[in-house]
Amino acid sequence: MSVRIADVAVVGGGIVGAACADAFSADGLSVELIEAGIVGGGASAAGMGHLTVMDDSEAQFALTSFSLRLWKRLETALPAEVEYSRCGTLWVAADDEEMAEVERKRQFYTLRGVTAETLDARQVAEAEPNLRPGLAGGLLVPGDRVIYAPCAAAWLVKRAIAGGARVRTGVRAVSTDASMGAGMVTLSDGGRVSAKHIVDATGAASPDLVRPRKGHLAITDRYAGFVRHQVVELGYLKSAHGHDIESVAFNVQPRATGQVLIGSSRQYGIGDSRVDAHLLARMLRRAVEYMPRIATLSVVRAWTGFRAATPDSLPLIGPSPRNGQVLLATGHEGLGITTSLGTARLLADWVAGRKPPIPIEPYLPTRFPAEVHRG
Amino acid sequence: MVEILVNGKVVRVAPGTTVAAAVLIAGEERFRHSVRGEPRGPLCGMGICFECCVTIDGRPNLRSCQMPCRDGMEVVTAVFNEG
Amino acid sequence: MKDSLAFEIVVVGAGPAGLAAACTASERARSVAIVDDNPAPGGQIWRGEARTPWIERARSSPVQLLTETQVVASPGEPALLAARGDRPVEIRYEKLILATGARERFLPFPGWTRPNVLGAGGLQALVKGGMPIAGKRVIVAGSGPLLLAVAAYLRRQGAKIAMVAEQASRGAVLKFARTVARSPSKLMQTLGLMRDLAGVPYRTGCWPVEAAQGEVKFRRGGRTWSEPCDYLACGFGLVPNTELAALLGCTSQDGFVAVDSRQQTTQPGVYCAGEPTGIGGAGLAIVEGRIAGYSATGRPDEARRLFAERDRGNRFRIKLQEAFRLRPELAALARPETIVCRCEDVSFGRIAEHRGWQAIKMQTRCGMGPCQARICGPAVDFLLGIPADSVRPPIFPVPAGLLAEDL
Ligand SMILES: Cc1cc2nc3c(=O)[nH]c(=O)nc-3n(C[C@H](O)[C@H](O)[C@H](O)COP(=O)(O)OP(=O)(O)OC[C@H]3O[C@@H](n4cnc5c(N)ncnc54)[C@H](O)[C@@H]3O)c2cc1C
Ligand SMILES: Cc1cc2nc3c(=O)[nH]c(=O)nc-3n(C[C@H](O)[C@H](O)[C@H](O)COP(=O)(O)OP(=O)(O)OC[C@H]3O[C@@H](n4cnc5c(N)ncnc54)[C@H](O)[C@@H]3O)c2cc1C
Ligand code: FES
């Protein structure tokens, strides 16, 4: 088998790899994208596609808000099947303690130029009539968006191809070597790709420092208008971003189809992709607690996906401490659909030697000592 | 006999009659609208195709071919239920 | 709290295979249950008929009949989750026999989504449910012996059968008829039907190419013409219901559940009988059901005594398959704009852009609707040779509240 030569070999065609292929190709570099399955499969075919600005840390805010700005620039270009929706996010507060959190969050966002509006109990009920009565209030973030990631990834890849990128699907990268200033990727079909830079965008399959964190989702038949915003409980902050072994949170989304996408769960240490009936039940009970009428909606399918989690909940973007030829683009946990575009931009700037619009340092894999990477 | 309402019209049927049959007896062949707005009606008759879905007592997306008529049921067809 | 039931043997499906399996198992087992989503036992063939020997036997046996109960998931342990209306029931088992039967295969052609086009078995089931058919002009089309049974039934109910159109060639059908006539009981059955169908044109090598309001265009021997009708009842053979087996991790082969000589699947303690293992009619289904019933209750010798009968059934199955093999012309009927996925309105042209089921599904939404590819999956497989191979719970849509309950 011959060796193909490219400036950049991107391994993994999920939303992150697709965004990277697009960004490098837009810079005029020759790109070879290698995907073991299909473009836009993997976690990207399992995730909710909520494009959201998050405030767990300054670094997380910087990457999510920057990425959301990049998504908004594509707004008019995205084809209909990407199901781009301007539904915004409604964070709901169950009690006074969570209302205090609403206020903190509102200030955080407002100070940084993100529109956020506090809703009282009545306004929350008006905004989402199917929420249970008696909630304390909520925070409306109207600028958040929702997309359908598999088609977004396919569209990014199509654009990369138009820019000259080559794409191979159904072929796995089995090893990467770096020697004499070039990287070499060996493929499962015996082929090889020699590239100056190798981007590891393999998501939860990445060998570097990520732990798979399993999630469940369920989708209903069509009930147009049942939910209007992505509605998330504020307790989400406590449960989902905690590091418990197993947690569920109320998180529902209106799909452009009229379907209701119901999330979500988080589990560590599970490699089995089967739906866990007990955890699914717990997740649905949580949803029914917040929106009692969800109990009557017909669920057509439940599935699972694996997020790539890191010890500090921030992604790994930049050279691998183990192999400088390899640029990591992984560890996006539950935000990779949002942060794919920002990730790709940071890496393209790094390779081009340009000053990035936001500092890359908080995401550099070298923030963890090399021993940690080796596990 | 069992009496049900199909799109506001009273239909009297023998016990054991399915809602799908009652809808047809009412002279209605458009059970639901497809995503693109085409009229659809029952196909499989055995609960797998979901083409016979109607709204029964306010609950949308129910398979009429699998549902026996019960006195006082209110059936509404072709509710445009897409987003 | 959901209800919880436990049995030594649980049979899913109360058609011929399931009834035979349950009755056989009940001779020995401490407790046997049959679970079926219909209001009465009988499956597709004996639907609504009170008096057939196996139904009578089941009714007078200790077998517990759980009707209007649909299995939707397998919560892990040797247990099934079923829906009874909006209520969940957990059904535990020591041994499980899957007898989930088959459904019709529908093929897309221009106009097949119109309300006046129904399944052949589909129209029969609807009429059994009270749909008025007397005086209606009906054409029955597609493939297989089911077409004749449906036409005869509809005629007894007062329908005017304008034509039965069989896509298989005259030669293939005649050869098959000679096979059938070799066994006396089958000959009787066929003659019975023939009397019912006296005067009805049975056209072989003939198939629908386009349906419109009030008429359907047919093709036969290079000629195309329109036939007026109120309904086109159309089915192209049967597709096995293998979703539950797939959910339980049983291996499939060429689209059918793989079983050993004792009807055991690749999952120990899980047996399968009837159409999911091969489309061979009620006779074969009954033998397989009995073998599964004997095997599941530790009676291999009794099971073995039925192997020869099963072999005969399998020979019949192969002849059936050969005679009614679908002709390739049928794959050319769908135009680029013809809908293939009816739940999501996905056209053939969009589907044909992709290779592989996952790409088709993720990129076009084909198979993502409430039928979860039960209708479009076999159609895509026939048109493009790509089987739909992704099963996730719930295998039938159920209210979220039902899945939310836990023990
Ligand atoms: C339940 C759930 C809900 C989520 N909700 C959201 C949300 O609302 N918003 C949001 O922003 N994010 C969300 N996420 C997170 C998001 O889905 C992921 O962060 C994102 O999809 C990661 O994209 P990726 O491209 O890195 O990985 P993936 O999409 O997993 O892609 C990796 C690809 O690499 C390929 N690959 C792996 N190994 C090899 C190899 N050796 N050779 C070739 N190819 C290989 C795989 O086949 C795969 O296609 C959610 C995740 C889950 C699980
Ligand atoms: C925003 C969004 C909306 C969606 N909307 C819908 C929708 O409306 N309808 C819909 O049907 N899907 C929908 N999907 C889900 C999609 O079809 C897949 O179910 C999802 O991508 C997750 O994939 P999966 O794990 O089911 O993978 P699959 O595509 O099913 O592939 C995973 C593999 O796992 C195997 N597998 C499947 N089930 C099991 C099991 N129980 N045990 C063991 N192995 C199994 C399969 O054989 C397959 O090889 C949506 C996805 C997204 C991201
Ligand atoms: S006709 Fe197919 S589900 Fe009712």
Image: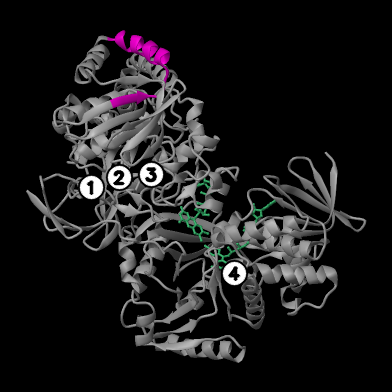
Q: Which residues are magenta?
A: C163-183
- The amino acid beneath tag 3 is Thr
Q: Is residue A129 left or right of residue C391?
A: left
Q: Quadrant of the C terminus of chain C?
A: bottom left
Label 4 near ligand 1 (CB < 8 Å): yes
- Mark 1 and mark 3 in contact? Answer it, CB < 8 Å: no
Q: Which residue is mark 3?
A: C113
Label 1 near ligand 3 (CB < 8 Å): yes
Q: Nearer the viewer, residue C80 or A124?
A: A124
Q: CA distance from mark 2 to mark 4?
A: 42 Å
- Which circle marks residue C294 in the picture? none
Q: Which residue is mark 1?
A: B20
Looking at marks 1 and 2 on the same chain, the residue that comes earlier in the sequence is marked by: 1
Q: Chain of mark 2?
A: B
In the figure, residue C354 lies in which quadrant?
Answer: top right
Q: Nearer the viewer, mark 2 or mark 4?
A: 2
In the figure, residue A179 lies in which quadrant?
Answer: bottom right
Q: Position of residue C386 (x, y in %)?
A: 54, 38
Q: Which residue is mark 2?
A: B42
Label 2 near ligand 3 (CB < 8 Å): yes
Q: Which residue is mark 4?
A: A335
Q: Position of residue B2 (x, y in %)?
A: 9, 51
Q: How is the image coloured?
A: one colour
Q: Residue at x 93, y 56 (%)?
A: A180
On whether residue A140 falls in the magenta region, the answer is: no
Q: Residue at x 36, y 34 (%)?
A: C216
